[in-house]
Amino acid sequence: MVEPPARTRRGERTRAALIAAARVVFEREGFLEARVCDITAEAGVASGTFYTYFDDKAQIFAAIVEAVQEDMLHPPVRERVEGDDVAAMIAAANREYLRAYAENARLMALFEQVAQIDPEFRELRRRRGQAFAERNAKLISRLQREGRADPGVDPLIAAHALSAMVGRTAYAIHVMQQEIDREALADTLTRLWVNALRLDSGSVNPAPAGPA
């Protein structure tokens, strides 16, 4: 049996080239103005090749967004923090998230715009927020069980609120061009996280990096 093109090495390379080209086109033209022929021209492939891998431009845009979100959701934080210093971990996560957001600011701005007009992307946006919140809720629950965080807060609600704080602040800085010192921002976001959960504020280190 012949493998579908996307599962062969050549197919994977072509698909990756289409995704890379689509990102260039979307960031240059915007989602609404981008055309499939623009993407294939950027990738240097025949127009029909696109439909071997994707149904339409919405599907390839979703593939781009999901790849970026996966990187942002799983930053290399553990490798950068020794032991179980939670405040340092939060600081590292916030800095890494802000760095990743800055690198993907144009794409994130497009994603926010498309989510306002397309129900499927709005659902994708909701799932993205849910994934961040559930990850952080696990951390908060563990800290509560260990007696290190305020037992009176709902872990998932607190995670949604704190994650939204970081995400919307990143949007304001990197998309809306709000002028705020990046180092002071990362330190302040971490302190707000620590204070909200009533962690030991003395362990907050402004030097590390990260998402929340």
Image (cartoon, rainbow, N blue to C red):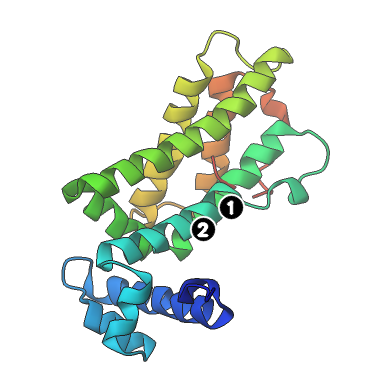
Q: Work out whether 57 lies above or below 46.
A: above
Q: Residue at x 33, y 68 (%)?
A: 54
Label annotation for residue 96: 1
Q: Is residue 51 left or right of residue 12?
A: left
CA distance separating discs 1 and 2: 6 Å
Q: Measured along the vertical axis of the image, is residue 76 above or below residue 18?
A: above
Identify which residue, 92 or 187, lies in the foreground. Answer: 92
**Residue at the right extreme?**
83
Instruction: Give the side of residue 130 with respect to residue 95, left or right.
Output: left
Seen from the viewer's position, the closer of residues 145 and 175 is 145
Indicate whether 79 appears above or below 204: below
- Depth check: 50 or 107 in front? 50
Is residue 13 visible to us here? yes
- In the rendered structure, which amino acid carries the disc numbered 1? Glu
CB of mark 1 within 8 Å of CB of mark 2?
yes
Amino acid type of the residue tagged 2 in the rendering: Ala
Question: Which residue was labeled with disc 2?
Answer: 100
Which quadrant holds the C terminus? top right
> In terms of secondary structure, where does tag 1 sit?
helix
